[in-house]
Structures are given as structure tokens and as C-alpha cells.
Image (spheres, grey):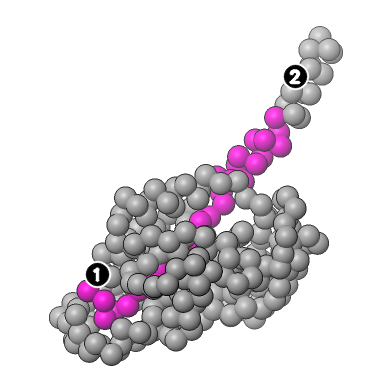
Amino acid sequence: MRFLISLILAQFLLLSPAMAQEQTAAQRPVLVELFTSQGCSSCPPADALLHDLAKRDDVIALALHVDYWDYIGWKDVFAKPAHSKRQTAYAHAGDRRTRYTPQMIVNGADHVVGNRVKDVTALVDRHARVAPKVALELTRTGGQVTIDARALEPLKGPLVVQVVRYSPENSIKITRGENAGRTINYANVVTDLTEIGTWDGRTPLSLKARVGESSPIAVIIQYAGHGAVEAVASLR
């Protein structure tokens, strides 16, 4: 009887790491960055799709409004030059010559036309099945967030740590340009994205940042040079 119990316990211990990895992988969120513009007639379906993605527990969906369409008749009230630069940096990192809207970048690694629902869903689901390489935990105390991360397997840094502030729900009435006459709802509009440090990917990471007591935030850990995202987490 003791032998049987010992055998069962040994099998459980052997399976436990794999089971833990599967559970962690299932909880690992996928970062989706939508580059969009209120002056782009093709963007509203992608903006609506981002709303759907934002409802998923396994996705952190962010809208980064670009400014390079402002000249065609409507100035996007959420647009920032930094978002346009970030999209350009992704293009250079991926050896692409063009940038476009609506574009979704998934985990910093793959891009897809943001209004193609099936293509977006397939790409997000593929990334969701990838086991994590980093354990990331966020803790907010008052207006400060503590960021703790550790590698689950060897990583070759450097990686950059970024804090994102975003506004969950926004409704804008557009009076000029390609979307004139429409009122469009926007989800998770990025209001600030700041790099707060770097990580070698080997030793455990612990950083603190001021973020406010209640505003939603996300933390992104990705390879320097706008490379792949290894971890992302949010506090709402």
C-alpha cells in the first residue's frame, strides 16, 4: 500500500511542473496594439474589434492613435507623435517599409490588418497558446506600482520595461474628414507610454513607478529595439 501511494505521489510530482506551465500559459495575456486614427475611414471596424478583444481575459488590448492622417480634414484628439514613431519603429524592426491603419501588432512580433476579424483572432489565439518565458506580477500601493519579474527560462536581454496609462471608454463625435457625422466609441486609448527601466533577463527584476491610485495601467516587457513582447500585465 505504501509503495502504491509513493508511486502515485511520484507521478504527481513529475506531472506538476508541466501542469503548472500549462496553467500559466493559459493565463498569459497577449498584447494587442492597434494603430488607428479618427481620420481613417477603414478604422472604425478595427476600433470595434478592439472593444471585443478588450473583454477577453487573455488579451490586453491598447489603442494607439497616430497623427499622420490629421492633415486630411480631422485632427484626431487622441493622436500622439510618439505613437506614430512607435509604429514606425515596429516597421523598421520587422524590415517593413510601410505603416498603415488600422494595423494591429501582436506581442510586438506579428502584424495584421486590424479590421480582418478572422485573421486577427487566429493570430491572437496562436500567441495565446505559447508558454510564457517570464513571470510578471504587479502590485499597487497607493499611487505606486511595484513590478516584479523573473525569467522562467534563460533570456538574452536587454529588455525594456514600459508603463502604459490608458482610458478604457471614450466616445467622440467626428464632424470633419472621412468619418464626418459619425460618433465612434474607442476602447483602452493610450494616454501615456513611458520606458522606466531595462532588464538583463537573468536576475530577478523589481522596479517601482508612480502611476496614480486608480487609473488603469499596463506594464510591457519587451526586447529593446521594439522586439518581441515577453510579458504584459495590467491593473484596472
Would residue 10 appear left or right of 209 to someone viewing this image? right
> In the picture shown, does residue 65 fall above or below 227?
below
> In the picture shown, does residue 119 fall above or below 102?
above
The disc at residue 5 is: none
Give the residue displayed 67% in from the left and 55% down from the top: 134
Give the residue displayed 50% in from the left and 72% down from the top: 92
Instruction: Find numbered disc 1 in the image and state the secondary structure of the residue it sits on.
Output: loop
Would residue 173 appear left or right of 188 to someone viewing this image? left
Would residue 172 appear left or right of 166 to someone viewing this image? left
Q: Which residue is mark 2?
A: 8
- Camera-side residue of 2 and 113: 113
- Numbered range of the magenta stretch: 15-41
Q: Which residue is mark 1?
A: 42
Tag nearer the camera, 2 or 1? 1
Amino acid tagged 1: Ser
Would residue 153 appear left or right of 47 to someone viewing this image? right
